[in-house]
Every structure is written in C-alpha cells, then in structure tokens.
Image (spheres, rainbow, N blue to C red):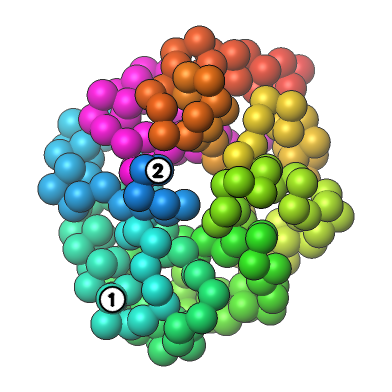
Amino acid sequence: MTAMLASVNSLAEALLVEAAAVDIIDLKQPARGALGALDVAVVAEIVRRMQPGSCVSATIGDLPMQPELILPAVQAMAATGVNYVKIGFFPGGDWQTCIAGLQTLAEQGVALVAVLFADTRPDFSIIDVLAKAGFRGVMLDTADKQLGSLTRLMTLDELQMFVDRVASLGLLSGLAGSLRVGDVAGLVQLSPDYLGFRGALCREHSRTAQLDVAQIDKLRQHWRALAY
C-alpha cells in the first residue's frame, strides 16, 4: 500500500503527525520555498524527540545545483540523524558534478532522495544516473505552487512512466505537489511508494499555515477507505 508523507515545519507539527500515524514525517519550512529547509539544530531536536520507529526525512532548501553548496548542506542535514535527506534538482547549475559528489556521500551511508519538478519538465533519463550514484529514491514534486497540483501539470500516463522507471531501478518513488484528497484515489492506482502532502493538511489549504487536525483525519479516513 502506498505510504503517506506529511511535511511539517516544527516539533509541534511533527508530534502531531506522528500521533496520527503518518508513515513519513518530512521536515521543511514551506515559507522558505518549495523545499525550504528548517535550521539544522531544529531538525536535530525534532529527530531526538521522535519515537525510535518513526521515519523522518528533511530537505536541504532551495539551493542552486552547485556542489560547494549542495554537499555541505547534505552532510549537515544527514548528521542530524534523519532517515532520508531530500535534494531538489532545480534547473541550471552543475547536476553532474553534484551527483558525483553525492555519490561519495551515498557510499558513506547517507540515504539520498532526489526531488525532480514536474513544472520544469525533467528528463526522466536522469533517474538512471541517480540510481547508479546510489540514491535511495526519486520524488516528483512541483516548484511553483501557483501552477496548481502535480496532476494538472502531468497526465496520469506520464506519472505512471515516472513511477515505473523508478521502481524498475529498485528505488523508492514519491509523488507530491499541492495534492488534495481528491487526487489520492487516482495516484494510489499508480503504485508509488508514497504520496506527499502539506497544503491539504493545513488550515484553509494554505501550505504556510498551521496543520489542521481535522484535515489530517479527513485524509487518513479517505486513505483507509481505499484499502478496502
């Protein structure tokens, strides 16, 4: 069954989604961008307070693809003890040199997840390169949240191609990007490893607002109904 990822921006929110039995607790600061990062010290404190069995991921921020920026940020975030470190592959910069450096970190045991952005129309052939470099997973998200959800930017056929390619290489696949409850049924049919949410779980569906327990419960109930 496809897992649920919830993005949180504080210890209080992390504890809230942990109590709701969300599968992956994703640490980021939406006010700082598509993959805005929380301060490393904050991430370390959240990890320390989570239950031993909780799965925690964290982003390194909306950084340009420059190895002198990407690599230290990944090392610092990995040192907090998160299970996965997420790196946004934004257009421009030096992807190949960044991947080469990240491969060294992967060989040292850092679990890396690459985030591609549907609104930049990424070439899915990069997934093969990421697999060879030792990445654990690849996620498809949206960079410009004003453009709408992932399902408006790519067809279900395109998303299925992404999920299938990632799965064929033995990596974890994730789909996110302004997803709503109504998107879940169709996306679960594609069999991604997880679906990611932020805005749908917040008050007034605003990704920079606080999480709303009622919205989390609504999504969890819908999710459970799909399992039967």
Residue depicted at x 48% and y 24%: 202
Q: Magenta part of the protein: which range?
A: 1-29
In this rendering, position of residue 29 left or right of residue 161: left
SS at mark 1 in the image: helix
Q: Which mark is residue 69?
A: 1
Residue 158 x %, y %: 81, 59
Q: Which one is nearer the viewer's eye here, 178 or 15? A: 178
* Residue 168 appears in the rendering: no
Taking 64 as reference, is 186 left or right?
right
Q: Percent position (x, y) of residue 210?
A: 38, 24
Residue type, label 1 = Leu
Between 221 and 201, the one nearer to me in the picture: 201
Circles 1 and 2: CB atoms closer than 8 Å: no
| Front disc: 1 or 2 | 2
Taking the view exactly as shown, the residue that stands out farthest to the top is 214
Tally of marks: 2
Give the quadrant of the C terminus.
Answer: top right
Q: Quadrant of residue 70?
A: bottom left
Query: 157 or 133, which is in the foreground?
Result: 157
Amino acid type at circle 2 is Pro
* Side (left or right) of 106 relative to 201: left
| Mark 2, residue position | 30
Furthest toward the right, the residue is: 157
Which numbered disc covers residue 151?
A: none
